[in-house]
Image (spheres, rainbow, N blue to C red):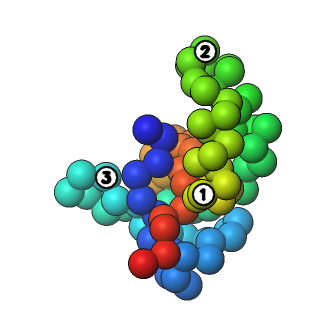
Amino acid sequence: MLAIMLLGARGYLMKVGDMVEYKFLQEIINVLVVREMSFGEYCQKHDEAMLEYDVDYAWIEWEKHGPTFEVLHPDGKLTVMWKPEAK
């Protein structure tokens, strides 16, 4: 799974340029939202990585969770993540 969790300072409405907390296991780090990705870009990332995936299932998840975001870690690593679901 590409996404773990994003906690935006302004609730769950994230946008490019926001600093958000990224929670992975027991560690929380601040990451920068670099860009919002389209569904086509999301699928292209899977294709480039030669990952097998079901496009129909990906579209269902996309409709349920909304767009994905590319975020920059302090160490320079880029990660693709879903925004968290509103509670």
Instruction: Using residue 81 as the reference point, say whether residue 56 is left or right of it.
Output: right
Vertical order, 63 against 87 (above or below):
above
For the point 76% across and 38% down, which residue is it?
41
Coordinates of residue 87 in the picture (x, y in percent): 42, 78
Check whether the beta carbons of the residues at disc 2 and disc 3 lie within 8 A of each other. Answer: no
For the point 42% across and 59% down, which residue is it?
5
Q: Between residues 11 and 72, which one lies in front from this camera angle?
A: 11
Give the residue pinned by disc 3.
24
Q: Earlier in the sequence, mark 2 or mark 3?
A: 3
Mark 2 vs mark 1, CA separation in Å: 24 Å
Give the residue pinned by disc 2.
50
For the point 75% across and 44% down, which residue is it?
39
Q: Nearer the viewer, mark 1 or mark 3?
A: 1
Mark 1 vs mark 3, CA separation in Å: 22 Å
Give the class, few, some or many, for how many residues have Cα within 10 Å of label 3's Cα (few <14, many ≥20): few
Mark 2 vs mark 3, CA separation in Å: 24 Å
Give the residue pinned by disc 1.
64
The residue under label 2 is which amino acid type? Met
Instruction: Using residue 25 as the reference point, say whether residue 48 is left or right of it.
Output: right
Q: Earlier in the sequence, mark 2 or mark 1?
A: 2
Instruction: Using residue 44 as the reference point, say whether residue 60 is left or right of it.
Output: left
Q: Residue furthest top?
A: 50
The residue under label 1 is which amino acid type? Lys
Vertical order, 76 against 52 (above or below):
below
Vertical order, 31 against 79 (above or below):
below
Q: Between residues 70 and 73, which one lies in front from this camera angle?
A: 70
Q: Nearer the viewer, mark 2 or mark 3?
A: 2
Q: Earlier in the sequence, mark 1 or mark 3?
A: 3
